[in-house]
Amino acid sequence: MGFEKFGRKSFAAITKTARFVDLLAEGKIEGTVCKDCGVKFFPPRADCAKCFSKNMDWFVMPEKGKLETFTTAYYAPLGFEADPPYTMGVVDFGNGLKLFARVAKEIKLEEVKVGMDVAIRPVKYDNGQLSFEVTKA
Amino acid sequence: MGFEKFGRKSFAAITKTARFVDLLAEGKIEGTVCKDCGVKFFPPRADCAKCFSKNMDWFVMPEKGKLETFTTAYYAPLGFEADPPYTMGVVDFGNGLKLFARVAKEIKLEEVKVGMDVAIRPVKYDNGQLSFEVTKA
Amino acid sequence: MKEVAVIGVGQTSFVRGYEGSIRELAFDAFREAMQDAGITQKDVDASVFCSAPEYDKQRSPAGVLAEYLGLIPQPTLYVETVCSSSSSGLKVAYGLIKSGLHDVIVVLGFQKMSEISSAESQERMGRGSDIQWEAPFGTMMPAYYALYAQAYMAKHGLTHDDLMNVRIKSSTYGVINDRAVYRKPIKPGDFKQGDPEAKMAGPVAWPLRVGDCCANADGSSCIILANAEKAKTLSKKPVWVLGIGAASEAVNMAARPDFTRGLSVGYTAAGQAYKMAGITAKDVKVAEVHDCFTIAEIMAYEGLGFAPPGEGKQLIREKATYKEGKIPVNVDGGLLSKGHPIGATGGSQIRTIVLQLRGETGPMQVAGEPDIGLVHNIGGVGLYGNVTIFGRD
Amino acid sequence: MKEVAVIGVGQTSFVRGYEGSIRELAFDAFREAMQDAGITQKDVDASVFCSAPEYDKQRSPAGVLAEYLGLIPQPTLYVETVCSSSSSGLKVAYGLIKSGLHDVIVVLGFQKMSEISSAESQERMGRGSDIQWEAPFGTMMPAYYALYAQAYMAKHGLTHDDLMNVRIKSSTYGVINDRAVYRKPIKPGDFKQGDPEAKMAGPVAWPLRVGDCCANADGSSCIILANAEKAKTLSKKPVWVLGIGAASEAVNMAARPDFTRGLSVGYTAAGQAYKMAGITAKDVKVAEVHDCFTIAEIMAYEGLGFAPPGEGKQLIREKATYKEGKIPVNVDGGLLSKGHPIGATGGSQIRTIVLQLRGETGPMQVAGEPDIGLVHNIGGVGLYGNVTIFGRD
Ligand SMILES: [Zn+2]
Ligand SMILES: [Zn+2]
């Protein structure tokens, strides 16, 4: 349990990576790194697909990257109806680490550009849900 | 539409055989018979699996048969919780025609026997749902 | 290579709100395919059913549909890769036939998207991506494809007009395909930004607009496959499965290597299929590609090698993928005009190519008696990719 | 016949309320199977995922799980025949390998029945039979199997004690199987009618009682298949797939010909599998049969030819299906003790037989180095039936 607090709306409650949400509550955005072979994963995983290890540590994600691509949604699935328009995109931190998230509302739509420098930060919604979002670098 | 009135609780609304429920409302339990090749079907079908015809007529099911087998349910799925215990069984009319239904509550559990002579009749539940049930011959 | 053939094809009209159950819907395509093949159920020794299960009330539909189709006691099973389910079904059937386990198999794709309520459907859409790491952001299919469109516009100079022209080509054939759900002609004015009368112009997931998206539909398709011996005995015009390719890609966008190179599964599956068939892209005379969104067709051109990476837009600018062009693509209207009843879509694409190779598509027929056709069928946002190559005797 | 082999097997403990997601659950069996085979993902060229989809929140799990298992970009697909899904997955993989399309395939069965709420689960149970003609009566799985039990009692003199003794045999092995969900010993007193302490005695769907029914569980299983060349290269102890049989039967009880002859799919699938393997029932040294209910095991004996029709009860009366008997059946505890995580069940049965043929089942090992083992896996109420025969070098 515990993972149901992640995201604007959660669809999953039980996962071995539920600690991600506790870290988020502490203001940290972290991925997992295999203690045995050193591979880093984001989104975090409980199992290493490279060496089959279960021994995972947490590591702090880089704070700055580039916006690789994005879209602005004018319709939304059930449970998100109050939100449109909202922008979502992929942030590339280099070295194979990327992240998918919403772009903060404070950034005007016309300011969002492919390739722009961005940062990520934790966010808490007014219903108490925790997530992370893309903001200006 | 129309088929949602069939059964203690319905899971299907749209079918080309929805007329079955209208007939049930008129007190008739009918199957379909292929106008082109004469095969009879119960439960009714809109399509003949033998000759691929769509031309179907309705025919009145026999009223009397034998109880081939039965069971008494002491637990029930969601939506049927008020009903247990209830007995369900298969009636064999001969010539390959059979039917699955609940056995009328008026028959005591200890009276229900494999091979007993039975009849079928339409039934209307207090919530307006229509069905058919097995009763004494 | 001529070891497994298509000996019968069928498809319902794709519609909104089919007035029957999934078993009746499935029967409609089955009847047409069986009559096309000229066989009865006794000639069939297994069946494969394909759909996206979230839209069905009926659990485990394979057995229920097999009973309704009269395909009992032959074995049956259910195969799913969302939007490419019936291409995966064909691959499974190919394996079961070529391995010698079965001789003749019915592959039945179906979807009754109107089976569940609109609210239920919306709820399921929210669970279409990774439910742990992406659905919580409020993702949906158009938004995912829009990520690719945005990257293409930034790097390759793809324009809204290019995307519009994919839809206009689609409508050219949708108008003449009586099985399509969208049959109205579409003109550039329908995409005019700021014009309330321009129904194709509204933003859905920018840069994708209403006209860039295909519609949900109810429908079924049926493909009957046979081994060489049965195909020669039972069929006058067998169409052979020459090549099969299939691939997968990470469901998470964070694990996608490059949004400016389209869907990796398109390249991978095409490479396998070409190799198995012993042909190259240049040998393909007619193709059906997975145009769930206009951008998807552009990416398909590149994955299939019809255009170099990033240059897919040139094909639509040059009208090269029209019926008279050098490589006709989706000249039955594609998903954009036919509609996209998830489990039935791949089978519909296969049917079109089979009929093209048999010369039986009427006003949609590609000239020159095409001998090699290709089907490109994507599941999810390039989560699954399937390419199948067909040839005639 | 030795063309496709099992080169690795894995299984989680079957539990109530697995504390992880389906991807983590799948990984646990995958890890064990990969380590058993001694291979890495580079050796695998396709994957097949099997479950009953109604229990998952995640749509189209094949791609999501393939990503988590590191089986991207290899093709993947999803196969379902409810309770026999992973046996159907094995059949599909056999076809894909023997046809030459792939060399090594991972077949992963999983089910996290606790993934959805109990009320949601109950709602889905109601839709397990024909939703148009039977679910409206309030049917459920125990009731369907009870129809067969009732008919057997009336015609063949089957007794409640016979059924009880099937469960007692099961518990004998459940106690020593550390992967089983139910590991407590069961004694005749537990079935004592009218005794409130007798937890196995309560009626569920008469004549079936609590002790006649297997329990839901969360679990996963993994089977790795390879062609002959790869099997010889990669594996020291390949176990060969010698025979495959599969059949279907009408979902509607009104279309079932005879309730006193058990499930028709058992006979049909067994006949095919024996024929393909070139053996008879007498050649089988150890078997896993689908004992979702005690009556199902009795019917399996007959379908498989271990006993004549109607005489299955004799085997349990004579203890012939105990480990020391003439045909040991479910000596790992079967579904009744292990639990029944739908999509994982067939793979668990296959794993047990593979380990029996390799001589690696510890206290459950059948003496005499068994050379031929059989798996009998039913989907629904005999809606689907799968029989697979395995042999060692
Ligand atoms: Zn590692
Ligand atoms: Zn007829």
Image (cartoon, coloured by chain):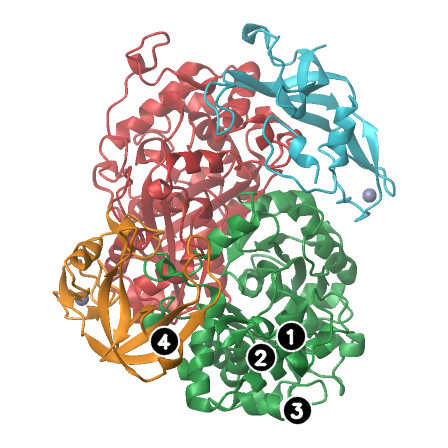
Chain colours: A orange, B cyan, C green, D red
Instruction: Give the Cα separation between the discs numbered 1 and 2.
Output: 7 Å
Q: Position of residue C103 (x, y in %)?
A: 63, 59
Do marks 4 and 3 both belong to one polypeptide chain? no
Mark 4 lies on a secondary structure that is loop
Name the residue carrying label 3: C326
Label 4 amino acid?
Answer: Lys
Q: Position of residue B104 (x, y in %)?
A: 63, 14
User: Callout 3: residue from which chain?
Assistant: C
Image region (quadrant) for ligand 2: top right
Instruction: Give the Cα separation between the discs numbered 1 and 4.
Output: 26 Å
Label 1 amino acid?
Answer: Ala
Instruction: Give the Cα separation between the discs numbered 2 and 4.
Output: 20 Å
Name the residue carrying label 1: C198
Instruction: Give the Cα separation between the discs numbered 4 and 3.
Output: 44 Å
- CB of residue at label 4: within 8 Å of ligand 1? no
Instruction: Give the number of the mark in front: 3 or 2.
Output: 2
